[in-house]
Image: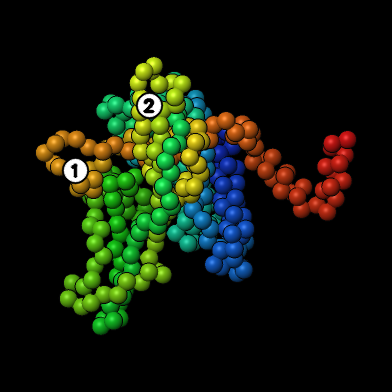
Amino acid sequence: RNENEDFLRGERYNHVDRIATAVDDYVQRSRNMGGPSSGKKGSATGDDVVGWGCPRVRISMAELRSENPRLAQRLRFDPLRHLRALEAACHAVATEERPGYDKDDVRIKVAIHGPVSATPSSPRDLASSSLRQLVCVEGVATKVSAIKPKVVKSVHFCPVTRQHESRVYVDATDPQLGLPAVDASGRELSDRVISITSSVYPTKDKDGNSLETEFGLSTYKDHQTVTLQEMPERAPMGQLPRSVELILDHDLVDKIKPGDRVQIVGVYRALSTSASGQSSTSGLFKTVLLVNNVQVLGRDVSHLTFSPQDIRTIRSLGKRKDILSILGRSVA
């Protein structure tokens, strides 16, 4: 985490401004959506609002590789653990730049963009040697599922004891699966490993009293699956294109439409036997790609890059009453 924080606080790439801009964009998006508390004052970011998804800051793999090659190498071959440390460093920076942004259990996330290796891969290139590694895959989206809520934490109330209790759920697609647990200070606990939990809602407490599920107090996340197929022009002649299943959560959902050509950065993982329902004697496991970043190819807007200073200038100009005169002079 210390190495990641030193990288983020360096003045070469202005990552501190990027993190602050990502939090501001999240707050602005929450206001535009009319969050459940969008009229109340008092938070450090202006309004007490809860938006869709979470703040996400984009970090280039090329920038990390040029600044700290060893850290980039560890991120590529042990991505889940180092992504968690990188997000913890971003959270520390965000709490300093925008105090109170995490008051509603909102945590900033990291999107790694750019080719991870020399060139982007295709679904045909994904083999067993790529498991548990950070990969960059290009292809065509052929099947996009509906967005469904997935429970993260359920809250239950006992009418007899008048007490609430909660339960956290971890499935095979959770990025934290298999990692050491962390304490309140962010330090890893080597004797505790995050494992798959049961998906059954508890109906009774430890004393046998009935429990009622508080659906309004429970926490959910958006979940979507996408089938990514190899581009037809890149498939070998006479062979059918290969495909891989993508897992998208939080703010990454609803970014891909069928037919889009996309570049995906994520972690290639084999699902465990208990979650996929496969026979434990076959030795075969279903593989998916846990998506970390989505970039749609072929759109003109994907080639536009705005610095944090550009975004601040655009917003300040948008508040001026003579903006039409300024635009007219610019065109003339």
Residue 32 screen position, x and y as percent:
62, 58
Vertical comparison of 41 with 159: above or below: above
Does the rendering let one see residue 313? Answer: yes
User: What amino acid is at disc 1?
Assistant: Gln
Which residue matches tag 2?
241
Vertical comparison of 141 with 51: above or below: above
Q: CA distance from mark 2 to mark 1?
A: 25 Å
Dot 2: element: loop
| Residue furthest top as drawn | 237
- Asked if residue 12 lies left or right of residue 105, the reply is right
User: What amino acid is at disc 2?
Assistant: Pro
Label number found at residue 278: 1
Q: Residue at position x 58%, y 42% from top?
A: 18
Residue 93 screen position, x and y as percent:
51, 47
Which tag, 2 or 1, sits closer to the chain's start? Answer: 2
Q: Residue at position x 26%, y 41% from top?
A: 271
| Residue furthest left as drawn | 281
